[in-house]
Amino acid sequence: MFLMNTNRVLIFITVLAVAFFALHNCWQSKPASEKWLYMNDGAARDYAGQVLGPGRGAKVPIPETLTHSVIEAYDTYVTFAPKSDSHLVLAFSPNAKPPAPKDPASAGKDWLPLGDSWYQLTLIPAGGQ
């Protein structure tokens, strides 16, 4: 009887390990933008809504979950750039695609739609989109 229980425990542990590694590999295969949105979409959307809406011009406190990002508010959109990934810049723009950046550091880049008012600053190929 004890051998049967030991076998069941080993099978259970094996199934858990396989499930863990499958989920881990799935998470690692996602792009950085998708990971950031998964973790921060709600807080970033709420913050941008306040900054672009009723809190316009006022000091809106940054949520604790977004303190690891550099946030800049513009007239019609808000950008979020994780401090851990200097190449990733996301924008929340509820009404339209944000205008192309004008700073020299962003030359050749434009906003690529990610879905539901989110955009990612991406290098545009020489031939255009």
Image (spheres, rainbow, N blue to C red):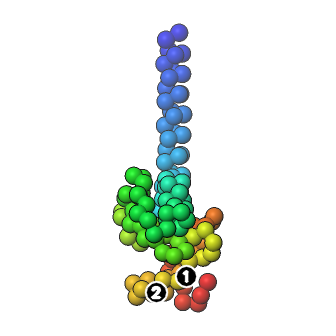
Q: Name the residue under label 1.
A: 99
Q: In this view, does 117 lie to the left or right of 89?
A: right
- Front residue of 13/50: it is 50
- Front residue of 116/15: it is 116
* Residue in the picture at 40% in, 88% down: 104
Residue lying furthest top: 1
What's the amino acid at mark 1?
Pro
Q: What element carries label 2?
A: loop
* Residue in the picture at 36% in, 64% down: 83
Q: What element carries label 1?
A: loop
Pointers 1 and 2 in contact (C-beta within 8 Å): yes
Counting other residues with Cα less than 10 Å from the Cα at mark 2, is it few (<14), some (14-19), or many (20 or more)?
A: few
In the rendered image, the vertical position of residue 23 relative to residue 30, given as above or below: above
Residue 32 position in % (x across, y down):
48, 62
Picture disc at residue 72: none
Real-space CA distance between mark 1 and mark 2, rounded to the nearest whole angstrom:
9 Å
What's the amino acid at mark 2?
Lys
Q: Name the residue under label 2.
A: 102
Q: In which quarter of the image is the C terminus?
A: bottom right
* Residue in the picture at 53% in, 83% down: 100
Whether residue 95 is visible: yes
